[in-house]
Amino acid sequence: MNIFTHFSQQITMITDHLVQNGTITLSGESRPAACEPPRDPSHGDLSTNYAMVMAKLAGMPPRDLAALLVKDIAALDGVAEVSIAGPGFINLTLEPHMWQGRIDDILSAGSKWGVNNLGNGEKINVEYVSANPTGPLHAAHARGAIIGDSLANLLNICGYNVTREYYINDAGKQVEMLARSVFTRYKQALGDTSAEVMEGQYPGEYLKDTAAKLVETHGDALLNMDETEWLPLIRLFAIDDMMLSIKSDLERLNIHMDRFSSEQQLVTDGAVDAAMNTLTDKGLIYQGVLEKPKAGNAEEWEPREQMLFRSTDFGDDVDRAVKKSDGSWTYFASDIAYHLDKLNRGSDTLINIWGADHGGYVKRMKSAVSAFTGNKDSLNIQLVQLVKLMDGGQQVKMSKRAGTFVTLSDVLDAVGRDILRFIMLTRRADQTMDFDYAEVTTQSRENPVFYVQYAHARASSVMRKDEVAQINMADADLGLLTDSNEMALIRQLASFPRLVEAAGQAFEPHRIAFYLMDLAASFHGLWNKGRDDASLRFITDDPKLTAARLKLVDATAVVIRNGFAILGVEAIKEM
């Protein structure tokens, strides 16, 4: 049972009953109550502002309505005390058994503890990573990849129908330059000492591997082809090879995409033309001349008439060009077509995880989606701030293989998947982060991932003890768990379903990481109390008390595992 949901429903039912018996009259439709922990723990276990929310509808002062509600709330099973505070807050203190009983709920639910139906099957598309296929994933991609994947995990257990998607930017000048760079390496591999990496080409050593595969597949046949023949061939070959590398790195990071969508395929299939025709039919495309931007990237600006999208109709700062003077579509036009494709596939909500450098692109993209959805706020864009890689306080700037950046593979080799995934979620996405190899691999209390994994390992070690096999867990008397540290831990465990719902509503998976750090601190604190005070040890001379405490330990391990599952981190049993 989710305690917060339970009492929210009970308070809503009390209000409905007061309406039915004529005690209060509402001028509009009743709203569901919401309960949450009070900001000040001394105010009780649960708090609701429901009287303040409903006061206007009831035509009463909030405190007067609260007084009516409190009479019936006090009679609810499990309520020890109820009071009114401030302008109309209602605070509840619960009987201990309401918390203690949740331990059995946790153990019964197991991996399902925290699962809810917040999304009610709504289709939601989470697009993340989407790195250009011009080289291996680098460390800067890691954070967005982990946030996107953890968010997808979170939404999945919140009852959404989630599609995890990677958009391959395989059209345009960047992939053409990739093909030319590979051709240079191809000629070098065949012994052409005059072939040099030209300015603007990709200098990374990784392209030597692609060139070697090209030689293995085609020999020297490409040297005898015209550019019009070898360029498209190498372009496809290089993209495929880069994507194999990218998919391999994602696999190492425990990321499995449901779909890889190709920009080039959208163009080839006429999806861009179709999207522009749709906007034209809506009267949102016109011929005009834009003023030159005063700042930022003016790459698409031309002092001549262009095909423009009326993005200002949907909150953008200026209208946007969708076709260049040479007749080709802009990147924005391709992105419009891609987002329309996601909507046409049935997604109710779209979430994009982008790097912070894409901040200037947000308004125009949201305006395009609004144009297709009738001004619905169907697109959520999360901007992920940069990560500075450090090693013992010294910045790490590049790798030998990539030449100009640190690859994701390098970071995984240095610290491992679980550390990388957890640490990347110990800051909000909109906060910059220093990631120090030396610090994140230390086994100390200051290392958050070690601290949480150690809590699970400790709990697992307790449950493996020989004495535990002799305990009949059915004899547990959970009412014996009365120590303030035990009760604090139980409240945290019981609060996990509410935390998951709140994180799902806010699209913020980092809340799970924060919760796990707090939970680990409480468990380690209880462990240390038992070391200092024999009466608080998990295994005692009292079989019923021991069984109850073992259930508490086991429930802690369950919740840590469930939290780790959302973050994509393994729950280690031994350290």
Image (cartoon, helix red, strand yellow):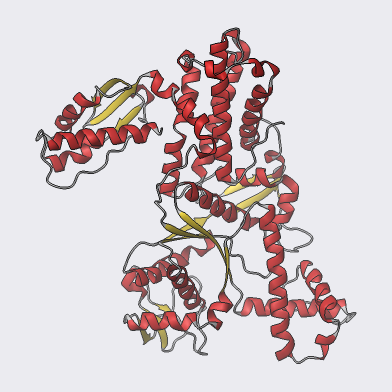
> Which residue is drawn at the image coordinates 57% and 24% (left, top)?
553
Q: Nearer the viewer, residue 499 or 32?
A: 32
Residue 220: where, in percent of width, then height? 86, 84
Q: In the rendered image, which quarter is residue 236 located in? A: bottom right
Q: How many marks?
A: 0
> Which residue is drawn at the image coordinates 36% and 33% (left, top)?
4
Q: Is residue 433 left or right of residue 488?
A: right
Residue 127: where, in percent of width, then height? 52, 61
Q: Nearer the viewer, residue 461 or 376?
A: 461
Q: Is residue 97 left or right of residue 425?
A: left
Quarter the N terminus occupies: top left
Residue 143: where, in percent of width, then height? 59, 53
Residue 299: where, in percent of width, then height? 52, 78
Q: Is residue 220 left or right of residue 389?
A: right
Q: Is residue 88 above or below residue 118?
A: above
Q: Is residue 220 visible?
A: yes
Q: Is residue 290 visible?
A: no
Q: In the rendered image, which quarter is residue 294 located in? A: bottom left
Q: Is residue 498 above or below residue 86?
A: below
Q: Nearer the viewer, residue 298 or 179?
A: 179
